Amino acid sequence: MSLDIAEELFIEELLEIWETEAQEKDSAEASRQRVAQKMASAIKKFIKSGVVTTIGSATTQTGQMT
């Protein structure tokens, strides 16, 4: 999937993280830890959603990469 398309899903996931944490009653430290873990997961998923297309073989890349 194009990262342009995935960006909207990524933003929705980040907003969900913040909204969920806003309702939590735990300590600030526990909340920071959960947010960091959830954001790392969301970023990883966003990056992995990108598709790289190349022209040529594995040893002789040519053309524009998209």
Image: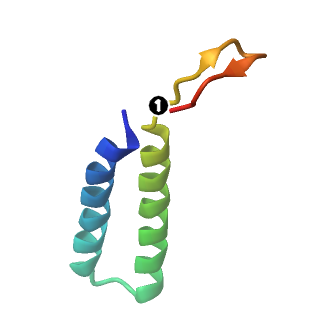
In this picture, is 24 found above or below 13?
below
In this picture, is 37 found above or below 44?
below
Classify 10 Å Cα crowding around label 1: few (below 14), some (14-19), many (20 and above).
few
Q: Residue at x 78, y 16 (%)?
A: 59
* Residue 53 locus on image (x, y percent): 52, 24
**Given the current orientation, which residue lies at the most extreme bottom position?**
28
Placement of the N terminus among the 4 image quadrants: top left
Q: How many marks?
A: 1
**Given the current orientation, which residue lies at the most extreme right position?**
59
Element class at badge 1? loop
Query: Would residue 29 be found to the left or right of residue 56 on screen?
Result: left
Q: Residue at x 48, y 63 (%)?
A: 37
Badge 1 amino acid? Val
* Residue 34 locus on image (x, y percent): 43, 69
Q: Residue at x 45, y 37 (%)?
A: 50
Q: Residue at x 26, y 52 (%)?
A: 8
Query: Would residue 12 be found to the left or right of residue 30 on screen?
Result: left
Q: Which residue is mark 1?
A: 51
* Residue 7 locus on image (x, y percent): 33, 51
Give the colour scheme of this rendering: rainbow
Choose between 65 and 16: the one closer to the eye: 65
Choose between 9 and 42: the one closer to the eye: 9
* Residue 63 locus on image (x, y percent): 61, 24
Choose between 46 and 56: the one closer to the eye: 56
**Given the current orientation, which residue lies at the most extreme front position?**
63
